[in-house]
Image (cartoon, helix red, strand yellow):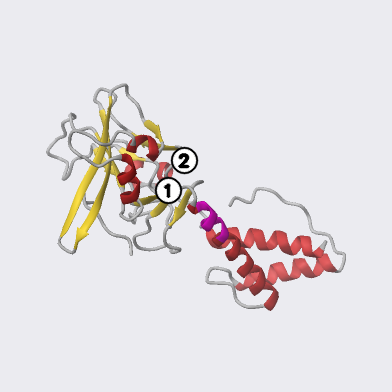
């Protein structure tokens, strides 16, 4: 039973290490989304980028993985080619169409790159768009771009992609310093779903490292305070001695139009 308790704690501790205590929710935490007078992307925004955002840090939903394991600076995501995603936004004017643009590029050499994009005009007051990247790529080649879907797939995993959601037909007043009817996603790269085998293995390895360090009594990282470790040690001690621990519930485990190479 003691081992079961330790495994439970390690699982919760790993979740704490891998996920911020107050997960970033773009719809609720982005300053722009709370104004209500500008279009605001509410998915494909994984990290707080404004000091006025309510919650800080990064939060990656299901089938979305951090490219870097860090909480500051550019933190693009890895998303999956065949997985179904929803791009969502808020505060669009229903009287005007919404233009969704997926942008990416191909590096040629140190001074040359090629830019590509896919776009769709939504005219029925939509505030979301459901898709797989495989479905979007099936529209290639186009009149503007001669690359096919296989070439798209080979490109988008090696560059940073983005979405732009805008209402180009909607006018805006002189009181605005920039167009309030355009917003952009965070950056991401698109990989074949097979990469999940590697990502899941890395997650398991991370959990194993936490377990190993815990058993050795080694510090397991910044953010795990001494009071928490003392409290857990106390609880484990009581559990191993036959003491009881009350059950509890409720633990609850973002501009420019350009391309950047991953390195």
Task: Please give the name of the residue rendered at 25% of the width and 26% of the height, measured from the top-left corner.
Answer: 97
Q: Quadrant location of residue 227?
A: bottom right
Residue at the spot 61% in from the left edge and 69% down from the top edge: 209
Q: Which residue is mark 2?
A: 83
Q: Which residue occupies the extreme left position in the image?
A: 174
Q: Is residue 231 left or right of residue 26?
A: right
Quarter the N terminus occupies = bottom right
Q: Quadrant of residue 206?
A: bottom right
Res 208 label: none
Question: From mark 2 to mark 1, how far is it between C-alphas?
Answer: 8 Å
Mark 1: which secondary structure? strand
Q: Nearer the viewer, residue 119 or 218?
A: 119
Q: Position of residue 219 (x, y in %)?
A: 60, 76
Split into 4 quadrants, where in the image is the C terminus?
Answer: bottom left
Range drawn in magenta: 196-201
Q: Are marks 2 and 1 in contact (CB under 8 Å)?
A: yes
Work out whether 16 lies above or below 172: below
Q: Residue 243: x percent and y percent?
A: 85, 64
Q: Is residue 149 placed above or below 195 in the rendered structure?
A: above
Above-or-below relation of 136 to 65: above
Residue in the foreground of this view, choosing between 66 and 252: 66
Bin the neighbour count of mark 1 within 10 Å (Cα to Cα): few under 14, some 14-19, many 20 and up: many
Q: Quadrant of residue 120?
A: top left
Q: How would you classify the magenta stretch by its main secondary structure?
A: helix
Q: Is residue 180 left or right of residue 6?
A: left
Q: Position of residue 84 (x, y in %)?
A: 46, 37
Q: Is residue 241 visible?
A: yes
Q: How many marks?
A: 2
Picture residue at 76% right of the left edge, 66% below the top:
235
Residue 167 painted magenta: no
Residue position marked by numbered label 1 in the rendering: 79
Residue 199 inside the magenta-drawn segment: yes
């Amino acid at each position: 039973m003691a081992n079961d308790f330790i495994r439970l704690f390690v699982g919760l501790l790993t979740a704490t290490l891998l996920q911020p205590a107050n997960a970033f929710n773009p719809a609720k935490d982005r300053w722009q989304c709370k104004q209500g007078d500008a279009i605001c992307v509410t998915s494909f925004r994984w990290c707080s980028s404004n000091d006025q955002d309510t919650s800080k840090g990064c939060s990656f939903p299901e089938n979305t993985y951090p490219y870097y394991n860090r909480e500051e600076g550019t933190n693009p995501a890895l998303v999956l080619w065949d997985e179904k995603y929803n791009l969502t936004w808020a505060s669009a004017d229903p009287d005007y169409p919404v233009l969704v643009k997926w942008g990416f590029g191909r590096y040629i050499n140190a001074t040359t790159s090629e830019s590509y994009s896919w776009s769709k005009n939504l005219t029925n007051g939509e505030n979301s768009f459901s898709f797989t990247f495989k479905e979007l790529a099936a529209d290639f080649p186009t009149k503007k771009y001669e690359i096919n879907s296989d070439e798209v797939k080979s490109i988008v995993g090696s560059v940073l992609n983005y979405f732009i959601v805008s209402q180009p037909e909607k006018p805006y007043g002189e009181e605005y310093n920039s167009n309030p009817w355009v917003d952009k996603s965070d950056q991401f790269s698109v990989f074949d779903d097979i990469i999940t085998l590697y990502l899941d293995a890395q997650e398991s390895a991370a959990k194993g490292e936490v377990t190993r360090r815990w058993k050795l009594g080694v510090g397991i990282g910044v953010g795990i305070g001494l009071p928490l470790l003392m409290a857990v040690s106390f609880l484990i001690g009581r559990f191993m001695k036959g003491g009881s621990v009350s059950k509890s519930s409720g633990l609850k485990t973002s501009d420019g139009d350009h391309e950047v190479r991953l390195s």
